[in-house]
Amino acid sequence: MSESVPVRCPACRTERAFTAPSYPCACGALVTPVLDRRAAPTAVAHRAWDEEWITLRCGACGRRGQWPRPELGCPCGTALRIPVTEAPLTTPRRPVFRSVAIRTALDAVTAAALYLRWLGYGDVRRADQRPTAGIGLAARGLLAQVDPRVSPASLRDVECLWLTAMTQSADCVYFSLSGYAEEARAGAERLRVPLFVLDLTGTPQPVNTQAAALDAQGA
């Protein structure tokens, strides 16, 4: 909910009420900065790109986004920059991931889809293009490959996924039941492709640094 605070212009000493703006997150929720009541507003003497933006976390889905820093125009002509606190309005707590035990290839696809939704991808569906191995999943801005084979995924498998995602201007992620060849791991690190291994409980285990970051931060 937006809040209002009294703001006194340092130039003319006029006091006005300022209401914090709300910004729409990709998930549909509104994100509102927390105004710092202890700090005084500052007059904008010059413009710098880095100072025009603040990073806010959505209290509904946990996504971080950059939004315009709150400002107020005083009738005297002074532009006032309104201070905000670094603390988020709410601290989202991601629910515990609940998957399905893997007994079949379809179970592996279901587990990967559930995990992607848990990360924050709400529109997970079957991909239009069939991958080199396994089954493809797609979400907005993401292409995933679920590989249920009993042999480790190869470098070619990872590179083909990456190339397909590049043509769609999307990120990509690979899920394998049997792990990855050493060349595949090295190639994924170079291409920054997150690699996961699906254990029999259906819980994806991060294999490389990109996968660990995705698991920790979400979409």
Image (cartoon, rainbow, N blue to C red):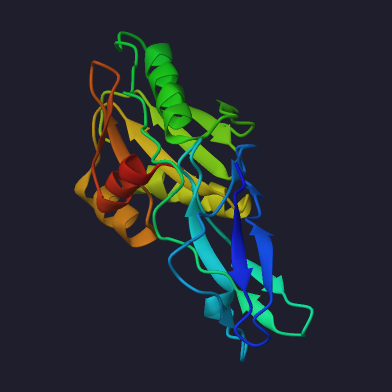
Q: Is residue 189 visible?
A: yes
Q: Position of residue 160 (x, y in %)?
A: 47, 47
Q: Is residue 119 above or below residue 49?
A: above
Q: Is residue 133 visible?
A: no
Q: How many marks overall? A: 0
Q: Position of residue 6 (x, y in %)?
A: 60, 63
| Extreme-left residue of the structure | 182
Residue 166 figure quarter = bottom right
> Does residue 98 appear left or right of residue 58 in this picture?
left
Along the viewing direction, whichever of 162 and 112 lies nearer the viewer:
112
Q: Is residue 81 above or below residue 164?
A: below
Taking the spot 64% from the left edge, 79% from the top edge, the residue there is: 9
Along the viewing direction, whichever of 54 and 109 lies nearer the viewer:
54
Taking the spot 65% from the left edge, 37% from the top edge, the residue there is: 28
Q: Position of residue 129 (x, y in %)?
A: 61, 34
Q: Is residue 69 above or below residue 149?
A: below
Taking the spot 73% from the left edge, 77% from the top edge, the residue there is: 74
Q: Position of residue 138 (x, y in %)?
A: 56, 34
Q: Image quadrant for the N terminus? A: top right
> Does residue 77 appear left or right of residue 215 in this picture?
right
> Does residue 39 appear left or right of residue 183 in this picture?
right
Residue 177 figure quarter = top left
| Extreme-bottom residue of the structure | 45
Along the viewing direction, whichever of 147 and 143 lies nearer the viewer:
143
Taking the spot 31% from the left edge, 43% from the top edge, the residue there is: 216
